[in-house]
Image: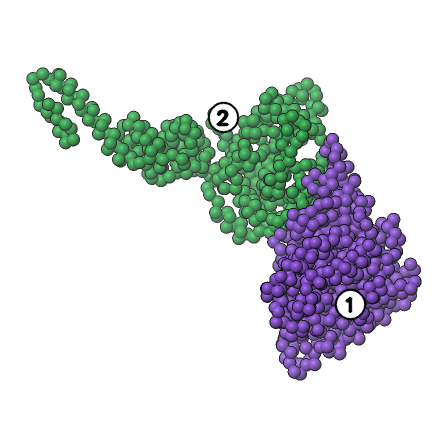
Chain colours: A purple, B green
Amino acid sequence: MPPSVTQTPRFLLHHHHHHHHRHQWRFPLSSPSDALHSRRRLPRRPSPSHSWVRASHSLPDTQTLVSSSSSASSSLHPSSEILRTRDALVSRQKTAVEVVEEYLDRLRRTEPLLRCFLHVATEAALREAEDLDRRIAGGEEVGELAGVVVAVKDNLCTANMPSTAGSRILEGYRPPFDATAVRRMRERGAIVVGKTNMDEFGMGSSTEGSAFQATLNPWDTSRVPGGSSGGSAAAVAARQCVISLGSDTGGSVRQPASFCGVVGIKPTYGRVSRFGLMAYASSLDVVGCFGSSVVDSAILLQVISGHDKMDATSSKHDVPKYASELSPKEYLESKPLKGLRVGVIRETLGEGVDLSVASSVQGAVSHLEELGAAVREVSVPSFDLGLPAYYILASSEASSNLARYDGVRYGNQVSAGELSSLYGNSRANGFGPEVKRRILMGTYALSAGYFDAYYKRAQKVRTLVQKSFKAALDENDLLVSPAAPTVAYKIGEKANDPLAMYAGDIMTVNVNLAGLPALVLPCGLVEVNNTSLPVGLQMIGAGFDEATLLRVGHIFEQTCQSSQFIPPMLADDFVS
Amino acid sequence: MGLPGCLPVLNSKVIEFAVKLGLALNCKLSLRSKFDRKQYFYPDLPKGYQISQFDVPIASHGYLDVDLPVEFGGGHRRFGITRVHMEEDAGKLIHAASGGYSQVDLNRAGVPLLEIVSEPDMRSGLEAAEYAAEIQRLVRYIGVSNGNMQEGSLRCDVNVSVRPKGQAKFGTKVEIKNMNSFSAMQRAIDFEISRQISLYNEGQENQIIQETRLWEEGSQRTVTMRTKEGLADYRYFPEPDLPDVVITEDYVHILRSGLPELPDAKRRRYEQLGLTMQDVLFLANDDNVADFFDATITNGADIKLAANWIMGDIAAYLKNEKLSINEIKLTPHELAELIASIKGGTISGKIGKEILFELIAKGGKVKALIEEKDLVQASAHFIVMITQSLINNKGVFETQVDLPSMKRLS
């Protein structure tokens, strides 16, 4: 693909000197009394002098679903499949069984082609739906994800359901516990319909690295869905489920979200518990969310976030009510993003990025400006160093985290008469080539005499990346870039070229190194040989500032021309 | 088990114990320390790495003062402590007698441990055994461990090297494992020392290689277990799943003030009471015995007498009956009472002994027992006297004695 972009981006290049210190961006201030409230986290009551209203008080509290709450919810957020499902259940328009069967039906029709799932739990899902119907009929309170069909990436433990991390070494393994994120979803009534396909142990960017099958992109089945959470992204894109969980170590939620035209959230490191996430790189891994709208992704994020005593790296930071702070389209002012400072990362729109992608992102940035945002270009100087630093750190931690897979206590064992053969044969047989590659790289980087040159050096680069981002985020409320340098590429195109595959992570790895949150949402379609392929816009925020990303993302989505990104293969199912 | 998706969580108790132990060993504490992964493959190590502390242990640069037993020449020694660090235990391998298979018991995998590394300051098996015994005493005193070698709550590995007198550089060190008691350790070390010296004397010191040898209790010798081809590369790197351990001066101060009197301080105090070194070591070495002794003298007992009773008759009883001093019914108060009674002449030493055994076995009060026993003794005595005088004084028949409780003889 020709990489050169000759046109310089059309942005406001002069600096608006706002504040010296970082401040939390708030909705436009219209009166002196607003200034007093500007630092308050909680939303204000609407007052008659404003045409724009913060909607949280008219939205039902998303904590509990009470029969008396009416269809106010989904009519305020027509883009939310979760709220639509809830309304249908509460008003008894549909039963949970009907809802689940609808999704299972679509899944059955599309799975033979797309192959998003490694395991479909049909019986369990229907049983849970029946149980839910009983409880609703009995007038019981049910959680905010009641009846919502969810898919879970196969590296997240689901009790008694196969969990393989896309690897043969765990073929048949059924964990005795749920990952915390899974447990929290289930506690709110979510129905887990199955486990999704992925690059083995999270190592890969196309899902072609799965030991079992390749998942195809619903927009064009000759192309990859992205990776490593390809199955979770494609399943949402194909509406086989409403929302799904993925994981993001170097871009594994954001890049597939971009390739599949869905919303993907990578939370701040520590926002969501890693307990039950099969570790790839402990200091980089996060559990992430996919949804077909920002509202749905926000609801899911809220459910799974929060401190967990089972994860010593999880944060005690409060979890804001992300979904409540998203206002319906009707209540937005004409310049709803006024006062928002957006920094476009210079290093992400130059050489190495497809023209079509750059152009889509520029279009998105213009849209942000039209909405009132103050946009300028920023430089994140250490950007290019992120990729090699990431691969050293991630591989090093992976070589350690994957040492436990020896076939002795669980998973596939290749028996041998002697211990090191047992280990060697089980691992050689169970791991795929990319996993072996990274374990070897990581072992080398940590070995005596090389630690200083590689691991320690990479940690220093990591510190530089963190500092660069912090500096950029001191001057901007959020930063934007593409989520990937290209649109979805053809199956097999990069499978035999690991370095080319790695290069595709350039837009995303720095965010993991810095531990920051990021949101990806579809911002345009690109025509390639009569096929439309989605492009995702990545927005990066300050630590634990998912709320700003979601608010901006929601406004962007609601005011976009093509607000519904439905893959053509489903056009018949969805009549707008 | 090292199940996929599991994460380690820090146990706050082990930090408290590490700080207490570090303080008791006179160490410098690191207010900020971290964990590292020590990586190697072995069946008893489920994750394929052990969480430990590599370059920043929680405590370092300390010392331990030990008194060698009188029967082995006595003397004070100060042994350096290189470091104290926290780590997790591995599982346990159980080898089938037939040799056909081995089993892995993972129950203790992940349980926190404290590792104490000493400076190479000991010069004989005896010194090492006394060092180990003192460590055992210390951890029991401060309540961080049962310190039981048989039960595995105290484990010792040793490294032994020799060098010609006058040479500054240390010789090649050999690791010895599989010693199940302090005396086994002492014998193993002494054997290894003489093995290495023999090799030197035969000009074959290059046969001393860095290896791990096993102590064979049966044949009383060390044998090669495995030869290490150079040092293992553990590929240490900082543990990403656990945050840094940060302790404050206040926290350390609170723990320091909560420490009991340590064995060495106790020994110095007993020395100052005027006891001999033999007495001092006996009384101070077991903190239950020391507490009993301290309580007895607090009740006013004569120091030397108290020591003698405890070390003599009481100790003998305990040994025979396989009891510990806090399991007997005799209380320090009553022992003090007994000692005072004997010292004051109320009863004889012989009677005192009898009363002692009653008190130990059944408890009770000295005063009450004196009344019971003393009378019986005295009355028997007088009957003899009177009979004798009757026999000796034919014709004279006077009762000169007036004992209210005595029956008149007719």
The residue at which mark 2 appears reads as B73
Q: Residue at x 46, y 43 (%)?
A: B260
Disc number for residue A319: none
Q: Chain of mark 2?
A: B
In percent of width and height, residue B59 lies at 59, 44
In percent of width and height, residue A371 lies at 77, 75
The one of A568 and B378 positioned closer to us in this rendering: A568
- What's the amino acid at mark 2? Gly
- Up the image or down, A373 lies above or below A101; here it is below
- Up the image or down, A541 lies above or below A416; here it is below
For marks 2 and 1, give the CA distance.
79 Å
Report the side of B402 relative to B309 (left or right). Answer: left
Q: Residue at x 77, y 70 (%)?
A: A557
State whether residue A257 appears in this view.
no
Q: Secondary structure at mark 2?
A: loop
State whether residue B352 appears in this view.
yes
The crowding category of the residue bearing disc 1, from other C-alpha atoms within 10 Å (few below 14, some 14 to 19, many at least 20), is many
Q: Residue at x 85, y 49 (%)?
A: A498
Q: Residue at x 60, y 40 (%)?
A: B107
Disc number for residue A343: 1
- What's the amino acid at mark 1? Gly
Most extreme residue toward the bottom is A49
What is the quadrant of the C terminus of chain B in the image?
Answer: top left
In percent of width and height, residue A20 lies at 70, 69
The one of A60 and A104 positioned closer to us in this rendering: A104
Q: Secondary structure at mark 1?
A: strand
The crowding category of the residue bearing disc 2, from other C-alpha atoms within 10 Å (few below 14, some 14 to 19, many at least 20), is few
In percent of width and height, residue B201 lies at 66, 19
